[in-house]
Image: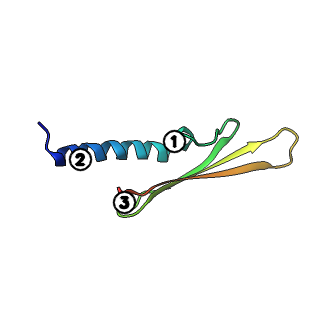
């Protein structure tokens, strides 16, 4: 039989796994707008020990006949310290 602290530890590990998955794959985040036709150009992340974890993904889309490309920045945040 698991103690409450063991259960909380296991629950936090599952929460952490899910949060990191979405931080590294923001295109899979539920309810996020589709990224069909967008191409990943740059990804950055910052996972400090005692504050919010963030990732930034920069996407571009080039329309046929357009002179430039559209750029989209998607930031994902997990308030690690609050959990």
Which image quarter: residue 14? top left
Left or right of 46 on screen, residue 59 = right
Provide the secondary structure element on which disc 3 rests: helix
Task: State the quadrant of the N terminus.
Answer: top left
The disc, 2 or 1, on the residue closer to the chain's N-terminal end is: 2
Instruction: Give the foreground label among 3 and 1.
Output: 3
Instruction: Give the foreground label among 2 and 1.
Output: 2
Gap between marks 2 and 3 measured at Cα: 15 Å
Task: State the quadrant of the C terminus.
Answer: bottom left
Disc ID at residue 25: 1
Q: Residue furthest right?
A: 65
Left or right of 63 on screen, residue 39 = left
Q: x, y (%) of residue 34?
A: 64, 38
Gap between marks 2 and 1 measured at Cα: 24 Å
Q: x, y (%) of residue 71?
A: 71, 51
Q: Residues within 10 Å of mark 2 (few under 14, many from 20)?
A: few
Residue at 51% in and 42% down: 25
Q: x, y (%) of residue 70?
A: 76, 49
Q: Residue furthest bottom?
A: 50
Give the colour scheme shown: rainbow
The residue labelled by disc 3 is: 82
Of residues 35 and 48, which is closer to you in this image? 35
Gap between marks 3 and 1 measured at Cα: 22 Å
24 up-or-down from 55: above or below? above
The residue labelled by disc 2 is: 9
């Amino acid at each position: 039989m698991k103690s409450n602290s063991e259960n909380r530890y296991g629950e936090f590990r599952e929460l952490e796994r899910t949060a990191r998955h979405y931080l590294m794959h923001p295109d899979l985040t539920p309810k996020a707008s589709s990224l069909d036709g967008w191409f990943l150009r740059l990804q950055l992340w910052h996972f400090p020990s005692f504050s919010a974890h963030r990732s930034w993904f920069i996407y571009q889309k080039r329309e046929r006949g357009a002179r430039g490309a559209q750029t989209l920045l998607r930031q994902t945040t997990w308030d690690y310290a609050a959990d």
